[in-house]
Amino acid sequence: MTRTVNLPGGTALPLIGFGTWQLGSKTAYESVRAALEIGYRHIDTATLYKNEADVGKAVRDSGVDREQVFITTKLRPQDARQARRTLESSLRMLDTGYVDLWLIHWPTGREELVSTWQELLSAKDAGLARNVGVSNYSPALIDLLTEATGRQPAVNQIPWSPAQHDPALLEEHSRRGVVVEGYSGLKNTDLRDPVLTEIARRHGATPAQVVLRWHLEHDIVVLPRSARRERVAANFDLEGLDLTKEDVTAIDNLARR
């Protein structure tokens, strides 16, 4: 059973997602097919990645019911002035009538911050995106959007890893009811760190599995990406891995070194 976190509207967001950044056409298709076969039900793509059509085809060919797969795509800031048209293009390529989450990939220029957010809200109201959010935004920018429109982002997708662990920033999001999705958690971690290798040894796991499980202990959504099926499977196989409180604290403390 995939662990989920509930978004404000009640949608269940799987805590383990499959990332597709830098996966080219054929690789994206094959990797997403493998991920869905292994049990992933959350796929993360973006206009910037240029693989939405491959992701959509993989979902379609997988035989998994579209309603069972949580699909995220993202709007590039330079497309802000044709946001709706960009989303409609994404939907055509993904071959679906809606995405489960549409994010602004990173902040636009100051003068377009609110109008772009209004475009996302309008797409949500039209049923084209079930949930909308942001990526690479600060709590102050999230507040600016919320104060201007009365509606806040459901999610903020930001870089997160043991070295970047910031309890105060997590608390800022939690207080606002904004779910944190962490990206590049493995890329930004030294998986040979003795703290991680020792915890992994004790649990009969890999350091990568330990890092991903640590994210889940903090209710942070993870988006691991790999083109190798065995690694795609290992990144998903976290249920039997029970970190102790001491393990979690030791990993938290890597940020202070």
Image (tube, grey):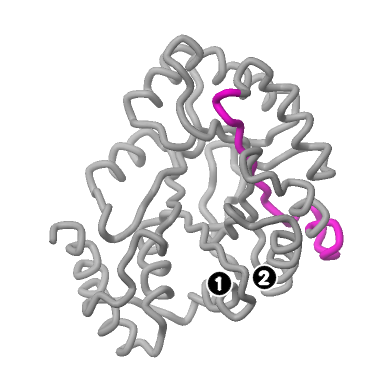
Query: Which amino acid is tagged 1?
Result: Phe
From the viewer's perspective, is 76 left or right of 59? Answer: left
Q: Secondary structure at mark 1?
A: helix
The dot on residue 138 is none
Q: Quadrant of the C terminus?
A: bottom left
Can you say whether 132 is above or below 26 in the image? Answer: above
Q: Secondary structure at mark 2?
A: loop
Residue at image position (41%, 73%) is: 208
Q: Position of residue 213 (x, y in %)?
A: 41, 69
Q: Are marks 1 and 2 in contact (CB under 8 Å)?
A: yes
Please say whether residue 115 is one of the residues in the magenta stretch.
no
Query: Which amino acid is tagged 2?
Result: Gly
Q: Few, some or many C-alpha atoms within 10 Å of disc 1 (few <14, some 14-19, many ≥20)?
A: many
Q: Quadrant of the N terminus?
A: bottom right
From the viewer's perspective, is 222 left or right of 175? Answer: right
Residue at image position (26%, 68%) is: 248
Q: Position of residue 149 (x, y in %)?
A: 50, 14
Residue 245: image quadrant is: bottom left
Residue that badge 2 annotates = 39
Residue 27: image quadrant is: bottom right
Q: CA distance from mark 1 to mark 2?
A: 8 Å
Residue at image position (58%, 16%) is: 118
Q: Earlier in the sequence, mark 1 or mark 2?
A: 2
